[in-house]
Image: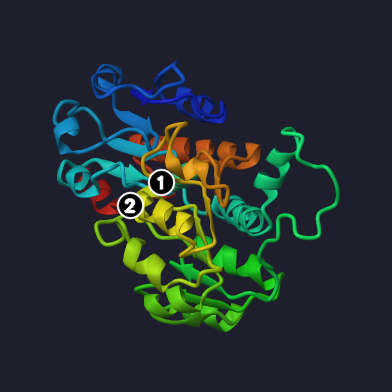
Amino acid sequence: MRIAMTRKIPAVAQDILQSIGDVDVWPEQMPPSPDKLLELTDGCDGILSTLNDRIDGAFLDQVPSVKVVSNFAVGYDNINVDDCTARGVAVCITPDVLTDTTADFAFALLLAAARRVSESHQSIPRGEWKTWEPLGYLGQDVHGSTLGIVGMGRIGVAMAKRAAGFNMPVIYSDMYRNEKAEQELGVKHVDFDEVLTRSDFISVHVPLTPETRQLFGAAEFEKMKESAVLINTSRGPVVDTNALVDALNSGKIWGAGLDVTDPEPLPADHPLLENEKAVVCPHIASASETTRSRMAQLAAENVKAVLTGETPPRCLNPEVLSRG
Ligand code: DGY
């Protein structure tokens, strides 16, 4: 058995995978190019991938030995699941283990953007803290403000739980009603437009699909309150970046807290970074020591289960497993 790991991830993954075969790990900081990915995975049985690897039919046709692709992420927009299913390749992901850590970070971005944490901190080394300022760094109150959640899945629910501690009424839009969350947390299902017009903060928790690509553009920012703050910890392309820059610069919305951007990585001279009301982080919402280890363990257990004929803990297309 041979397994390719496309990045270095916490050691627990390699320990698990070495118990069933040989493991080749891409050693560099930058992810492998498509050509190098093919070299790395040539002849392997399983791939432990990351969100940087494009896995589709054209790729899989060149590595027909692959039986499982296990993504070190809950998101899987880098993988064409239909192409995998058509070729009998199991696709696995790492949900649940990162839910709370990601929601913690979404809430951290919300607080940081609302209360101008990063911007005011950065003023100190510039020597701008001369006195206590009655009018300095006035932000938006978080407590008691309305939070709009777009996508009431696992992370959306975890975000709503955090909002409860700040006495924030929560409204949400989703193609599916989450009645459990409505009953247990008192969140209210509304249509997307109502989230846009009523929310003081909007936090996005949807997967990237053709339907959610550029869900937030000029028309949506136009509908939002001028005091509103957009939080995105899902995928960058859910937001039209140029429209967001315009909305921030023209005061159509007040601020943004972004863990994901389009493009990613964001170039150091990108106009988004020039607007101080945008708090931008380099896609680190799940990056706690414990959570990344749990993700590594789950990703490796997924590979091991598929390759040893067991049921993987988190498989997106279990129908391929019964095909033998
Ligand atoms: C995911 O899991 O999809 C995140 O973006 C990385 O943790």
Q: Position of residue 164 (x, y in %)?
A: 67, 73
The circle drawn on residue 316 is 2
Residue 287 falls left or right of residue 319:
right
Residue 80 falls left or right of residue 105:
left
Q: Quadrant of the N terminus?
A: top left
The circle drawn on residue 81 is none
Seen in the picture, residue 14 relative to 145 is either above or below; the reply is: above
Q: Position of residue 190 (x, y in %)?
A: 43, 82
Report if residue 84 is visible in the image: yes
Which residue is more in the foreground, 254 or 264?
A: 254
The amino acid at mark 1 is: Ile
The residue sitting at 51% across, 38% down in the picture is 282
Q: Position of residue 15 (x, y in %)?
A: 53, 25
Report if residue 97 is visible in the image: no
The residue sitting at 46% across, 54% down in the picture is 249
Mark sitting earlier along the chain (1/2): 1
Seen in the picture, residue 276 relative to 62 is either above or below; the reply is: below
SS label for mark 2: loop
